[in-house]
């Protein structure tokens, strides 16, 4: 885990315990409840802690998009408990807890009033690293999100620890599985957890109304990740920005969002029955250079010539010649798009590149390599050392491969630019960089995806049964039907 293991050994300073929040009243919608930027010591980020035997490491995550998140790594080869869990309000833990050493950690109660929220969102990234001697892990892990109310703090007959969970299975309803499953794309994803969809149905007292689940006095949050049928080896779960929102939450199956599940929605289920749910990846050429430079420029201390070339990969392209024998200093050469290119509709970018010797000039010596970057002012999101040849090749880069990974907001920043960089290190002679067809790549999920009730990748009989129940159930907005959200 690179330097992360080192966090385990860092001495823990004074723990910054968040003040109880219910005294401040209900959490205002839009509030980030946990951003992991307060308690950033090496042991329990914002008082979160972990459980589960496959654990190999846990701690603050400097690779989060805003520099402060949390992560939990585990290896499913380690025998023992079948899950990786994280939680807050599940402590406090006495000194001697494996990550915190002589210091205690965690807190017993987060004391949150979520009564104004309709849902929580959480950012998650599943990383599947190669960790010698192990090859890269595989995806499929699924998370049950849990809220625990503070009835457990009461004593006597009222003491009842009501846990509400995203249902993984519901007795008698094998077609329900609401667990959260990150894709295997290793990108940050934002998941929404509708509070009306949390199932406290196995708590007899809660259903009977004796000690109903109390959103206004939440004691703890837990997340429990279990492997899917194909999940193996090392999985690293990154998480950040748990946010309370009050966006409308529609019943499951309410495709037209008119707040009820009726025959109009049934048409959509029929339309989606049996369709391929695989995401598609349409592309759109952003710069083809057919009308000229299209605002691109060529710079750098080794630069000797640049402009349009008839021989792009498709019609015209651009070229940039560098003489690495020039007695100058600097990074190399760079080609940049105009400022303000909006890439927020895309999940990646491709560009056709070749690198040539220039006839009559000193032959090029060194690696034919370049960096692809997005830049906002001085900040760079970059993938380095892409290996080119003397023939055009298409280099496709997902934005999650850039370090750091840009946010959606950054992808539409008015100062955003695309950069192709050829560095001078280890290079000599004269090199011509040719490029063309700068193309945005999208990932488009099937609009039918939300109708897959048990998330088994197909819309079939199981999902029809769920629809039928939510259609015919006695008013899904009134009764206790978490599987209808
Ligand atoms: Ca954060
Ligand atoms: Ca409807
Ligand atoms: Ca072209
Ligand atoms: Ca299904």
Image: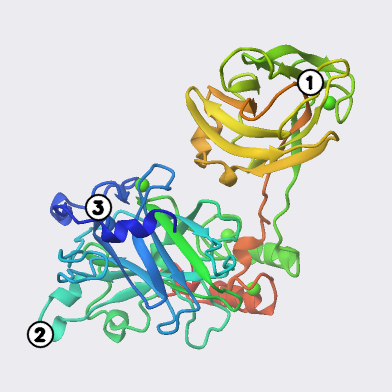
The image position of residue 245, as x and y in percent, is 37, 50
| Residue 44 quadrant | bottom left
Q: Nearer the viewer, residue 112 or 408?
A: 408
Circle 1 Cα neighbour tier, 10 Å, few/some/many (<14 / 14–19 / ≥20) = many
Real-space CA distance between mark 2 and mark 3, rounded to the nearest whole angstrom? 38 Å
Q: Seen in the image, is 56 located left or right of residue 270?
A: left
**At 62% across and 79% down in the image, what residue appears?**
465
**At 70% across and 56% down in the image, what residue appears?**
279
| Residue 148 quadrant | bottom left
The residue where tag 1 is placed is 318
Q: Secondary structure at mark 2?
A: helix
Q: Earlier in the sequence, mark 2 or mark 3?
A: 3
The residue where tag 2 is placed is 156
Q: Is residue 227 above or below residue 204?
A: above
Dividing the image into four quarters, tell me where ligand 2 lies: bottom right
Q: Is residue 137 above or below residue 430?
A: below
**At 49% across and 81% down in the image, what residue appears?**
169
The residue where tag 3 is placed is 41
Can residue 326 be seen?
yes
Q: Earlier in the sequence, mark 2 or mark 1?
A: 2
Tag in front: 2 or 1: 1
The image position of residue 150, as x and y in percent, is 19, 70
User: Which quadrant is the N terminus positioned in?
Assistant: bottom left
Q: Earlier in the sequence, mark 3 or mark 1?
A: 3
Real-space CA distance between mark 3 and mark 1, rounded to the nearest whole angstrom? 49 Å
Q: Nearer the viewer, residue 179 or 260?
A: 179
Asked if the residues shown at circle 2 and circle 1 are in contact, with their CB atoms under 8 angstroms apart, the answer is: no
């Amino acid at each position: 885990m690179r330097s992360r293991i080192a966090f385990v050994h860092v001495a823990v300073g004074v723990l910054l315990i968040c003040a109880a929040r219910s005294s401040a009243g209900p959490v205002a919608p839009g509030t980030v409840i946990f951003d992991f930027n307060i308690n950033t010591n090496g042991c329990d980020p914002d008082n979160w802690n972990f459980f589960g035997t496959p654990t190999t490491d846990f701690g603050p995550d400097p690779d989060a998009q805003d520099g402060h998140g949390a992560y939990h790594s585990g290896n499913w080869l380690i025998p023992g408990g079948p899950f990786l869990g994280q939680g807050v309000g599940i402590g406090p833990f006495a000194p001697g807890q494996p990550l915190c050493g002589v210091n205690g950690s965690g807190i017993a109660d987060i004391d949150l009033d979520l009564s104004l929220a309709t849902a929580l969102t959480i950012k998650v990234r599943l990383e599947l690293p190669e960790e010698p001697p192990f090859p890269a892990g595989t995806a499929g892990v699924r998370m049950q999100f849990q809220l625990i109310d503070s009835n457990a703090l009461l004593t006597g007959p009222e003491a009842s620890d009501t846990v509400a969970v995203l249902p993984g299975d519901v007795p008698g309803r094998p077609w329900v599985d609401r667990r959260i499953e990150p894709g295997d794309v290793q990108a940050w994803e934002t998941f929404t957890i509708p509070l009306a969809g949390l199932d406290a149905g196995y708590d007899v007292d809660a259903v009977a109304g004796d000690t109903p689940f109390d959103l206004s006095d939440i004691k703890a949050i837990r997340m429990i990740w279990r492997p899917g049928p194909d999940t193996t080896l090392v999985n690293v779960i990154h998480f950040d920005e748990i946010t309370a929102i009050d966006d409308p939450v529609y019943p499951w199956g309410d495709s037209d969002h008119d707040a009820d599940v009726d025959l109009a929605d049934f048409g959509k289920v029929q339309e989606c029955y049996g369709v391929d749910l695989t995401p598609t990846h349409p592309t759109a050429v952003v710069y083809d250079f057919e009308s000229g430079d299209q605002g691109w420029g060529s710079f750098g201390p080794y630069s000797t010539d640049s402009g349009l070339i008839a021989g792009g990969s498709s019609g015209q392209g651009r070229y940039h010649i560098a003489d690495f024998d020039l007695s100058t200093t600097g990074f190399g050469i760079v080609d940049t798009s105009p400022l303000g290119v909006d890439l927020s509709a895309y999940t990646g970018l491709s560009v056709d590149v070749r690198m040539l010797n220039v006839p009559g000039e000193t032959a090029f010596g060194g690696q034919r390599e370049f960096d692809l970057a997005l830049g906002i002012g001085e900040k760079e999101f970059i993938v380095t050392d892409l290996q080119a040849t003397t023939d055009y090749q298409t280099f496709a880069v997902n934005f999650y491969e850039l370090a750091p990974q840009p946010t959606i907001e950054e992808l539409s920043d008015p100062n955003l630019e695309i950069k192709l960089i050829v560095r001078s290190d280890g290079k000599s002679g004269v090199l011509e960089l040719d490029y063309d067809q700068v193309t945005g790549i999208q990932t488009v999920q099937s609009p039918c995806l939300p109708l897959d009730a048990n998330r088994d990748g197909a819309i079939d009989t199981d999902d029809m049964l769920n629809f039928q129940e939510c259609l015919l159930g006695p008013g899904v907005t009134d009764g206790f039907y978490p599987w209808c959200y």
